Amino acid sequence: MTGDDNPTAASPDDATVLLRVEGALARATLNRPRAINALDHGMVRVLADALTDWEKDEGVAAVLLDGAGERGLCAGGDIRAIRASAVDGDRRAADFWRDEYRLNARIARYPKPYVALMDGVVMGGGVGVSAHGRVRVVTERSKVGMPETTIGFVPDVGGTYLLSRAPGETGTHLGLTGTPIGAGDAVYTGMADHYVPSERLPDLVAALTRARTEAEVIETVGGFAKIAPAAPLEARRGWIDACYSADTAEEIVARLRDHGDPEAAKAADTIAAKSPTSVKTTLAALRRARDLDTLEEVLEQEYRVSSATLTWPDLAEGIRAQVVDKDRRPRWAPATLAGVSDADVARAFDPAPDGPVGLAAPVAACEGPGGAR
């Protein structure tokens, strides 16, 4: 990665976030390629501080986020660290989420154009630092998703805000199954704005260094954008809307199995393999998020739920099965949807032990083309 003419403005090459200013473009590159740039607490703090500095810098016209390596922008949060916090029974994970959610909200209302290159893998926390931005670019390599039910967790980082506002019940489908989507579906569901072939990204970045106004940034990205690929989810809206509009997770699965479409049956099998507690809580979180007006309100709700998951056996067990032992055979408790009561789900929305995150931005401050619209 190259910096601008002022080498003191650039981060050392071994930093977990590379910061530099090139022309009028401030650049932040997530730099943990071996971990697909998974976010840790230090990286969140670096990004937050950089946004503060660049907001004050009159020479910076826009901010661009990308990821080092060829695999993706960001695979999510450091879930090994989250598991350690859950096992130890401390609040390290909650402290991380508090700062992460503040960063997500900050990105959504950032006063300068925030351009996110959502190339390759963009999961969980990667969605949080990209899909709330004002200009969100996907490529033919993009795999965007909120896979939290797979590890006994619940979509966060404003994911339930985005999913709850996707067309029809497509967001419910994505939230419960954790299915990643490509560029076409990302644009269709509102998680991205522009499709740019990956081979054009270097030229796009070079052009953005010369943009001096918001209008020039938008025009520049538009000049590189192509028509997005077809959106498979749009073609599947018939069974998705019919099945996922049910009131309960059990009824959703039953409708999927009875529908007759092979893709619907496949979705039922996928949900059945997820944490039952996560599935039911995710459904409740999505339905509640629809009735909340701002991203900040949704993030506060997500913080309550995230904090509650630290006491669930499924969080540590799900991460064990997926990334520690990698046996892919989690032992969920309870093991079935029927075993998760309404009271169990309701407790996940109780106030967090350490209080709210403290997000109180006015609605007008959060309006924009991307994220909290």
Image: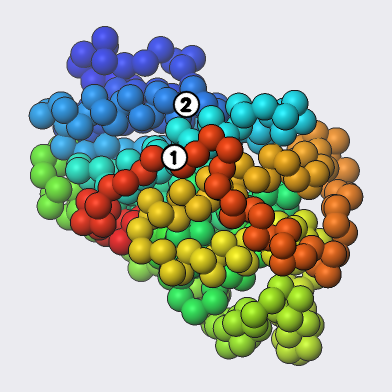
Q: Nearer the viewer, residue 195 or 280?
A: 280
Residue name at image x 49 percent, y 14 percent: 14
Residue name at image x 87 percent, y 59 percent: 335
> Residue 138, relative to residue 311: is it above or below?
below
Give residue 29's mark.
none
Q: Residue 260 at what x, y percent from top left?
A: 76, 89
What's the image's color scheme?
A: rainbow
> Residue 132, relative to residue 27: is it above or below?
below
From mark 2 to mark 1, how far is it between C-alphas?
19 Å
Q: Which residue is mark 1?
A: 357
Question: In terms of secondary structure, where does tag 2 sit?
Answer: helix
Residue name at image x 39 percent, y 59 percent: 192
Q: Is residue 242 visible?
A: yes
Q: Residue 308 at what x, y percent from top left?
A: 65, 45
Q: Which quadrant holds the N terminus?
A: top left
Q: Nearer the viewer, mark 2 or mark 1?
A: 1
Q: Residue 289 at what x, y percent from top left?
A: 48, 64
Few, some or many C-alpha atoms within 10 Å of disc 1 (few <14, some 14-19, many ≥20)? many
Q: Nearer the viewer, residue 161 or 127?
A: 161
Give the residue type at disc 1: Val
Q: Which residue is mark 2?
A: 43
Q: Earlier in the sequence, mark 2 or mark 1?
A: 2
Few, some or many C-alpha atoms within 10 Å of disc 2 (few <14, some 14-19, many ≥20)? many
